[in-house]
Image: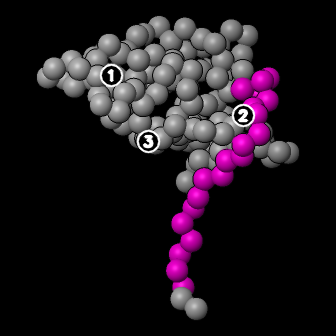
């Protein structure tokens, strides 16, 4: 047998999301900005202080916080998914709509955080270009282990 390295994968399950967990991961918070041009604003999934019974140290939480790749679309700029020369919609239409869950690049985009009322963990936001959307999540967005 060959010694082929195993490529880390992504896990996802088709079951519905737990509404309480989903609300915590993507809290309703005003991002304070609106996307312009061909950009999309997304909210990154928040990470918890514990995974199972293990309490994560602050350095680990900080690294995982900004490495999240699962996000909820919360705003779409007026030129997103349009030909920039003619302003005609792309032939395949919009890839995503507000409320969809998507995968976004691990790095890049304009990133910031906003406080969540009565919670010490902030909501995380990113603005990316429309062509940077990696994929649309078609199963439970909380089931992904996307920190590779």
Mark 1 = which residue? Answer: 80
Q: Quadrant of the C terminus?
A: bottom right
Q: Is residue 72 above or below residue 114?
A: below
Query: Closest to the observer: 14 or 102?
Result: 14
Q: Which residues are magenta?
A: 3-22
Query: x, y (%) of residue 82?
Result: 27, 23
Query: Real-space Cα distance between discs 1 and 3?
Result: 15 Å
Closer to the N terminus: mark 1 or mark 3? 1
* Residue located 60% across and 11% down the image: 29
Going by the picture, which residue comes out furthest to the bottom?
Answer: 1
Mark 2 = which residue? Answer: 48
In the rendered image, is residue 66 in sight? Answer: no
* Residue located 64% across and 23% down the image: 26
Q: Quadrant of residue 70?
A: top right
Query: x, y (%) of residue 75?
Result: 45, 16
For residue 134, which numbered disc appears in the image? 3
* Residue located 72% across and 21% down the image: 23
Q: Is residue 8 magenta?
A: yes
């Amino acid at each position: 047998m060959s010694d082929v390295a195993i490529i880390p994968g992504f896990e996802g399950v088709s079951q519905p999301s737990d509404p309480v967990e989903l609300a915590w991961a993507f809290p309703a918070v005003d991002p304070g900005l609106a996307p312009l041009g061909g950009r999309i604003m997304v909210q990154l999934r928040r990470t918890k202080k514990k995974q199972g019974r293990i309490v994560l140290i602050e350095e680990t939480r900080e690294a995982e916080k900004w490495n999240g790749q699962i996000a909820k679309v919360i705003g779409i700029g007026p030129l997103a998914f349009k030909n920039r020369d003619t302003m005609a919609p792309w032939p395949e239409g919009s890839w995503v709509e507000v409320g969809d869950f998507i995968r976004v690049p691990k790095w890049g985009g304009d990133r910031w955080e906003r406080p969540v009322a009565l919670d010490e963990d902030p909501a995380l936001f990113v603005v990316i270009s429309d062509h940077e959307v990696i994929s649309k999540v078609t199963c439970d967005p909380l089931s992904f282990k996307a920190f590779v």
